[in-house]
Image (cartoon, helix red, strand yellow):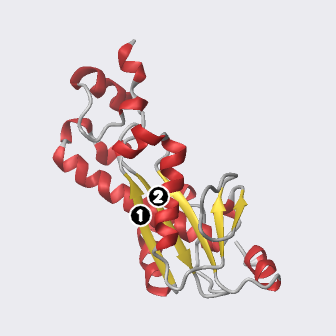
Amino acid sequence: MDWKLENSLYDEGFQIIAGTDEAGRGPLAGPVFAAAVILPLGFEIEGLNDSKKLTEKKREKLFDVIIENAISYAIESSSVEEIDTLNILEASQLAMRRAVAKLEPSPDLVLVDGNIARNFSQKTRCVIHGDAISPSIAAASILAKVSRDRLCMEIDREFPEYNFKKHKGYGTKEHMEALRKLGPCPHHRKTFLKFLDK
């Protein structure tokens, strides 16, 4: 992964560029997390990649490197209640906006992973597959993913019968069977459980 995208934007005149990404749009349970990161220009982080392509151990290691070296970073979330009320897309956007709003200094451009960026206070550029192209977005994807996974480990201690530590809330066969047997716990997204009505 190189700095080609960010460098071209700095050449356009932007001075502070942040990347933002979310983790947890697909699971049946738990909040959706988002992170925003401003990295020092050209800062090389060995092994930096889309969080989904990294092992848990590698993500944890990179998490520490990112927070130690970032100019600024923030990690935020949208709750299960917000997901059920707004829908997952709007809740994801809200979590990203919350993270970006916490950055200091405030960026003059935000690179948003994907093809949708709604209601940000700053200028935005959508970057499809941004977590594989932009170091800033890749760093944000790791912070969001690790933070969400850590919360799932806490939920697992609270509700061990669902085995959150293994599936992290995703709709695995084991998770679906537990839901059919036990019903949802307070961390489940009601709007994601329509299959239980069948």
Q: Is residue 135 visible?
A: yes
Q: What amino acid is found at the position of numbered circle 2 in the picture? A: Ala
Which residue sits at x=63%, y=71%? 122
- Above or below 14: residue 34: above
Which residue sits at x=52%, y=63%? 97
Q: Which residue is mark 2?
A: 95
Which residue sits at x=34%, y=43%? 81
- In terms of depth relative to the viewer, which is nearer, 133 or 115? 115
List x then y, in percent, for residue 96: 52, 61
Q: What amino acid is found at the position of numbered circle 1 in the picture? A: Glu
Task: Single out the residue that lies furthest toward the top.
Answer: 198
List x then y, in percent, for residue 144: 46, 62
User: Considering the numbered disc 2 on the image, is that residue within a helix, a strand or a loop?
Assistant: helix
| The disc label shown at residue 76, or none | 1
List x then y, in percent, for residue 32: 43, 51
| The disc label shown at residue 48, or none | none
Quadrant in the picture for residue 109: bottom right
Left or right: residue 18 compared with residue 164: right
Quadrant assignment for the C terminus: top left
How far apart marks 1 and 2 lie (CA) works out to 6 Å
- In terms of depth relative to the viewer, which is nearer, 120 or 126? 120
Please say if the residues under marks 1 and 2 sit with CB atoms less than 8 Å apart.
Answer: yes
- Above or below 36: residue 33: above
Quadrant in the picture for residue 148: bottom left
